[in-house]
Image (tube, rainbow, N blue to C red):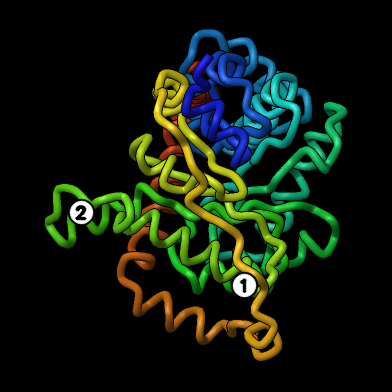
């Protein structure tokens, strides 16, 4: 029997489900799963998760939280509870994101990461099954450096350029998530191009550049391509360490019969490059980010989007439990 493209891809790359939808995770049985504020908000809107929401709210109240802090705590508990449910299905890890509003505050990001891990621990989940997801700002990367030094594994998200990837390597983070589709979207609009052949797709090319740099310099940080727009983009990165893929694309791959070959192959280490490598400084990082209009715009818009998604969840909770009326009483 001919293997599907998804089966062949799983032999080359670790496939991760990019969703908070428990039914979809159950269907495709990935090794790991990733969540973000947008996915958590979408999951919270599903009728089957009503009990999780009510349980999170009840726990936050029982802990003594009130007013706006009650909502914030409910969101954190709900995020972790959903992660716990995901971990009942997947064998590996779940990525849980720190509030994007903290993306430019190193100390607050570290504190929030530890809060989330404490919640997981209270539900009996081992720390090694959690990846703390943090935006790839300079401050976020420094927070990850602190956490990694304490044995807390991190997934650096909203990554759009090699300068961010270098800083993550210097921080010895566990995993990075370079965004493929959002890079394509930006260039499609900026260059007014309808279509790129996959070998010239700007998002695919960006991840390949990072992959080659990491392997050449023997960087241990794993690369997980994210934010895909098409099956072709996913298959264009076959052989990457990990790929996190949305359920609708996993469904397409499960029906696709084409032959899948590795598009990324680890290069031999370049010992001269390793010997001469210098860590990127904060000043150099900021300069490169400011001169890369695509990365600069997408990093900020990504943070803004995740903040907005959390605000939508905030509104959903207030509405569900009549919190505004209660807080105003």
Residue lying at 66% horizontally and 34% vertically, measured from the top left: 32
Q: How many marks?
A: 2
- Residue 11 falls in image quadrant: top right
SS state under label 2: helix
Q: Position of residue 84 (x, y in %)?
A: 73, 26
Residue lying at 63% horizontally and 85% vertically, measured from the top left: 273
Q: Position of residue 97 (x, y in %)?
A: 60, 44
Residue 188 marker? 2
Q: Position of residue 317 (x, y in %)?
A: 51, 24
Query: Which residue in the protein does label 1 denote?
Result: 216
The one of 44 and 269 positioned closer to us in this rendering: 269
Q: Is residue 20 above or below residue 279?
A: above
- Residue 17 falls in image quadrant: top right
Q: Work out whether mark 1 precedes mark 2 in sequence or the reverse, and give the earlier one.
A: 2
The one of 110 and 184 positioned closer to us in this rendering: 184
Q: Is residue 270 above or below residue 134?
A: below
The one of 80 and 21 positioned closer to us in this rendering: 21
- How far, Cα to Cα, is label 1 from label 2? 30 Å
């Amino acid at each position: 029997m001919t293997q599907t493209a998804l089966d062949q891809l799983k032999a080359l790359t670790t496939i991760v489900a990019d969703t908070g939808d428990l039914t979809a995770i159950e269907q495709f049985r990935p090794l790991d799963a990733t969540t973000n504020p947008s996915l958590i908000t979408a999951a919270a809107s599903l009728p089957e998760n009503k009990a999780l929401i009510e349980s999170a709210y009840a726990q936050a109240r029982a802990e003594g939280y009130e007013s706006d802090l009650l909502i914030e705590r409910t969101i954190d508990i709900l995020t972790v509870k959903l992660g716990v449910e995901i971990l009942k299905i997947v064998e590996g890890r779940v990525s849980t994101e720190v509030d994007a509003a903290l993306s430019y505050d190193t100390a607050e990001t570290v504190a929030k990461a530890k809060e989330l891990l404490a919640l997981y621990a209270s539900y009996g989940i081992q720390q090694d099954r959690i990846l703390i997801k943090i935006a790839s700002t300079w401050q976020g990367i420094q927070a990850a450096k602190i956490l990694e030094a304490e044995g807390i594994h991190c997934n650096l998200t909203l990554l759009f350029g090699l300068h961010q990837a270098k800083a993550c390597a210097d921080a010895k983070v566990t995993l990075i998530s370079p965004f493929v589709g959002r890079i394509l979207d930006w260039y499609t609009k900026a260059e007014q191009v309808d279509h790129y052949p996959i070998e010239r797709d700007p998002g695919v090319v960006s991840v390949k550049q990072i992959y080659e740099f990491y392997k050449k310099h023997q960087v241990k940080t794993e690369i997980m391509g994210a934010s895909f727009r098409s099956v072709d983009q996913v298959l264009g990165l076959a052989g990457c360490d990990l790929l996190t893929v949305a359920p609708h694309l996993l469904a397409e791959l499960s029906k696709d019969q084409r032959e899948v070959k590795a598009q990324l192959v680890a290069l031999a280490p370049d010992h001269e490059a390793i010997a001469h490598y210098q860590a990127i400084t904060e000043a150099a990082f900021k300069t490169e980010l400011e001169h890369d209009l695509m990365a600069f715009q997408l990093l900020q818009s990504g943070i803004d989007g995740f903040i907005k998604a959390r605000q939508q969840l905030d509104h959903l909770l207030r509405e569900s439990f009549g919190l505004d009326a209660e807080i105003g009483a």
